[in-house]
C-alpha cells in the first residue's frame, strides 16, 4: 500500500534529488534575475541559475525548469542562445534569446519579442 508519506518522498526526490542537469552551466552573462520595463510584464522576473530557468510573476507564481542544453552563436556584440529545458512534468521547451553586450553590462531580448528589453536586477 502506498502511503501519503511515500508519495511525498517520491515528489521530493523528483523535484530535488533527480536533477541531472547540474553539469549544464549557464553562461555567466545570463546568471541572475532579469526584469523589463515593458508594462505587459509588470511583476515578472526571469531568473537563470547554473542549471535552471525560473519564470516568476509576482510573489504567487514561480515556474522552475531544468536546462538540458544551451547552444550559443556569436555575431559581433550579440550572442544568440538556444536554450532547451524541461518543466517539472518533463515537457520540453526551447527559448531563443539574444544577449547584447554593452559598456554597462548587457541586456537580453527574446527572439520572438525583440522589442522587449530585459535587464539584470539580481545578483549573479
Image: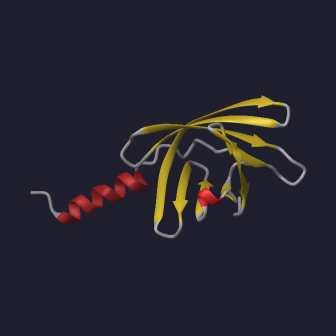
Q: Colour scheme used in the picture?
A: secondary structure
Q: Is residue 27 visible?
A: no
Q: Position of residue 22 (x, y in %)?
A: 54, 46
- Residue at image location 59% in from the left, 65% down from the top: 43
Q: Quadrant of the N terminus?
A: bottom left
Rendering quarter of residue 11: bottom left
- Residue at image location 41% in from the left, 53% down from the top: 17
Q: Quadrant of the C terminus?
A: bottom right
Q: Nearer the viewer, residue 3 or 76?
A: 76
- On screen, residue 50 versus residue 59, left or right, reads right
Residue pushed farthest right?
103
Q: Position of residue 54 (x, y in %)?
A: 54, 54
- On screen, residue 122 versus residue 3, left or right, reads right
Mark count: 0
Rendering quarter of residue 76: top right
- 9 over 21 or under it: above or below: below
- 63 over 72 or under it: above or below: below
- 32 over 29 or under it: above or below: below
- Residue at image location 79% in from the left, 42% down from the top: 100
Residue pushed farthest left?
1
Q: Nearer the viewer, residue 60 or 40?
A: 40
Q: Position of residue 99 (x, y in %)?
A: 74, 42
- Residue at image location 90% in from the left, 50% down from the top: 103
Residue pushed farthest bottom?
59
Q: Is residue 61 visible?
A: yes
- On screen, residue 79 versus residue 86, left or right, reads right
Q: Position of residue 90 (x, y in %)?
A: 38, 42
Amino acid at each position: 500500500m502506498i502511503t501519503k508519506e511515500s508519495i511525498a518522498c517520491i515528489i521530493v526526490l523528483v523535484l530535488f534529488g533527480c536533477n541531472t542537469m547540474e553539469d549544464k552551466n549557464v553562461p555567466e552573462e545570463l546568471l541572475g534575475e532579469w526584469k523589463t520595463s515593458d508594462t505587459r510584464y509588470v511583476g515578472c522576473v526571469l531568473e537563470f541559475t547554473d542549471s535552471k530557468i525560473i519564470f516568476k510573476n509576482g510573489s504567487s507564481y514561480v515556474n522552475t525548469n531544468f536546462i538540458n542544453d544551451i547552444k550559443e552563436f556569436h555575431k559581433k556584440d550579440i550572442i544568440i542562445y538556444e536554450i532547451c529545458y524541461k518543466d517539472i512534468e518533463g515537457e520540453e521547451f526551447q527559448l531563443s534569446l539574444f544577449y547584447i553586450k554593452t559598456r554597462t553590462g548587457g541586456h537580453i531580448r527574446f527572439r520572438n519579442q525583440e522589442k522587449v528589453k530585459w535587464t539584470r536586477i539580481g545578483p549573479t
